[in-house]
Structure formats: structure tokens, C-alpha cells
Image (spheres, helix red, strand yellow):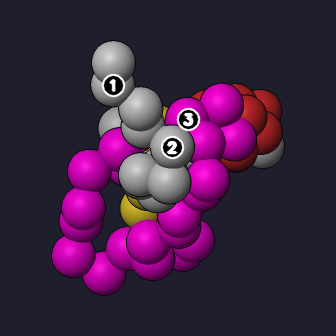
């Protein structure tokens, strides 16, 4: 039986504050943001999209 306990992987996004862009993949000059779960990461994406950020 597989047990993934203790092997939690951080979920990452990259954000460009000046141009209001959130990216799901690494981009030069963007700040990396780490989240403890995919749900937390996606909540953040929705918050930023409602605030006018572009998502790529």
C-alpha cells in the first residue's frame, strides 16, 4: 500500500507585480510563491484574477 504521508510537495506560482501577471510556470523576473496545497494555490489564482491580474 502506498503512503504519501510526509512527502507533501509545495505548489508554486510566479507573479509579476508590476505587470499584474500570475504564471503557472517559472518566468524570469517573476517572484515565486509557494503554497502548501493545490487548493490554496488555486484560491490565490482566483483572488488575483478578480483583482485584475492576467493568468498564464
Farthest top residue in view = 1
Badge 2 density bin: few <14, some 14–19, many ≥20, Cα 10 Å: few
Work out whether residue 39 or residue 24 is closer to the camera in this orientation and state it: 39
**Residue 54 position within the rendered picture, expressed as x and y whole percent measured from the top left:** 51, 40
Q: Secondary structure at mark 1?
A: loop
Asked if residue 39 shows in the view, the reply is yes
Q: Which residue is mark 3?
A: 38
Q: Residues within 10 Å of mark 3 (few under 14, many from 20)?
A: few
Residue 23, percent across and down? 38, 49
Which type of secondary structure does the marked residue at label 2 adopt? loop
- Residue 44 in the magenta stretch? The answer is no
In percent of the image, x 61 and y 53: which residue is there? 36
Magenta stretch: give its range: 15-41
Q: Can see residue 52? A: no
Disc 3 to disc 2, C-alpha distance: 16 Å
Give the residue number, with chain letter if any, for mark 2. Answer: 5
Amino acid at each position: 500500500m502506498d503512503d504519501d504521508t510526509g512527502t507533501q510537495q509545495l505548489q508554486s506560482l510566479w507573479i509579476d507585480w508590476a505587470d499584474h501577471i500570475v504564471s503557472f510556470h517559472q518566468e524570469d523576473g517573476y517572484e515565486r510563491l509557494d503554497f502548501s496545497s493545490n487548493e490554496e494555490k488555486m484560491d490565490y489564482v482566483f483572488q488575483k484574477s478578480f483583482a485584475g491580474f492576467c493568468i498564464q
